[in-house]
Image (cartoon, helix red, strand yellow):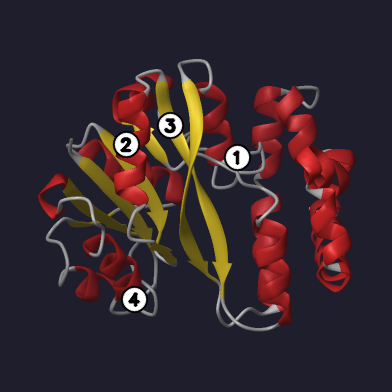
């Protein structure tokens, strides 16, 4: 089975090498992995570095939804894995994904457990928060059967936020989702609260398109944007509340960040 790894980039010279190294380090046979980088007009050395690892480096924009669709159109794999440039795969990810979909033909897409990497208090908080989301409607699938992706219509290019949630909702109608435990690491080293909130503010301005598309009373939308699930439900379901009690300082830090992000969303 050929698996295409699609990586979208823009000025990622600090991260793209580590990302591509992790693809090369997969225990899955290298000849069965195709690596495609879609760059959005970087002004640094992102493309130069990427070309050391793959000749399939393209320029396309204007936003990541369009970049992903372009990369997937260029791909030849039966399945694809889409990544951001600041992500690093653990060595068994592709192997476990292939084994999972091969064991059950009804599975068309997979969540991959994600761990926030980096040092500092707020990154410990971000890592703690992200650990609650795996396989929930706050998460999104990353390993997808290309045929079903195309049948679902691909990423909505009007969206530069929530485009993965939007795709998930269409894919759910076509087959089963599952999750693999071999993680990917999301590098957020150099975390800046100011930049983090600015980024959240930028994405929040596009979220109304997604909400309008599915309706504010859609069950998933109500969870993704409603107060109860985002601030309580996702952290207490399936016994996860025990982690809150074990880590009170991280819990307090997490709710501080979530409060600030919530304000950004309300002020959008």
As drawn, 176 above or below 93: above
Q: Is residue 201 left or right of residue 158?
A: right
How far apart in space, not on screen, are marks 2 and 4 (Cα)?
39 Å
Image x and y of residue 88, in percent:
40, 65
Up the image or down, 63 lies above or below 97; here it is below
In the rendered image, residue 214, in percent from the top left (x then y), is placed at 67, 24
> Distance between the Cα atoms at labels 3 and 4?
34 Å
Q: Quadrant of residue 102?
A: top left
Judged from the image, the secondary structure of the residue bearing numbered disc 3 is: strand
Name the residue tied to disc 1.
135
**137 or 241: nearer the eye?**
241
For marks 1 and 4, give the CA distance.
36 Å
First in sequence: mark 1 or mark 2?
2
Residue 43's label in the rendered image is 4
User: Are discs 2 and 3 less than 8 Å apart at CB?
Assistant: no
Element at label 4: loop
**Count the marks: how many?**
4
Residue sitting at 27 percent across and 60 percent down?
A: 23
Q: Earlier in the sequence, mark 2 or mark 3?
A: 2
Residue 26: percent from left, percent from top: 26, 58
Numbered circle sitting on residue 99: 2
Q: Badge 3: how crowded within 10 Å, few (<14), some, or many (20+)? A: many
Cβ atoms at labels 1 and 4 below 8 Å apart: no
Residue nearer the viewer, 218 or 21: 21
User: On the image, numbered disc 3 is attached to which residue?
Assistant: 109
Disc 3 versus disc 1: distance between alpha carbons? 11 Å
> Could you say whether the residue bearing mark 1 is in a helix, strand or loop?
loop
């Amino acid at each position: 089975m050929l698996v295409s790894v699609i990586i979208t980039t823009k000025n990622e010279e600090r991260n793209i090498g580590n990302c591509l190294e992790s693809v090369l380090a997969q225990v899955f046979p290298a000849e069965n992995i195709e690596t495609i980088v879609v760059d959005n007009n970087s002004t640094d050395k992102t493309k130069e570095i990427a070309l050391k690892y793959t000749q399939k480096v393209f320029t396309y924009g204007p936003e990541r939804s369009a970049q992903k669709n372009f990369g997937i159109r260029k791909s030849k794999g039966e399945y694809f894995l889409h990544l951001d440039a600041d992500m690093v795969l653990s060595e068994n990810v592709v192997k476990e994904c292939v084994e999972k979909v091969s064991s059950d033909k009804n599975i068309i897409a997979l969540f991959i457990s994600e761990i926030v990497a980096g040092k500092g208090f707020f990154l410990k908080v971000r890592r703690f928060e992200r650990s609650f989301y795996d396989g929930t409607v706050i998460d999104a699938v990353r390993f997808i059967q290309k045929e079903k992706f195309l049948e679902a219509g691909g990423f909505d290019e009007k969206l530069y936020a929530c485009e993965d949630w939007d795709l998930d909702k269409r894919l759910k109608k076509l087959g089963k989702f599952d999750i693999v435990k071999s993680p990917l690491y999301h590098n957020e080293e150099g975390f800046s609260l100011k930049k983090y909130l600015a980024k959240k503010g930028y994405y929040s301005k596009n979220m109304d398109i997604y909400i309008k598309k599915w309706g504010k009373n859609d069950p998933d939308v109500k969870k993704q944007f409603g107060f109860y699930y985002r601030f309580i439900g996702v952290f207490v379901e399936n016994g996860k509340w025990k982690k809150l009690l074990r880590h009170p300082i991280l819990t307090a830090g997490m709710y501080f960040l979530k409060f600030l992000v919530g304000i950004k969303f309300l002020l959008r």
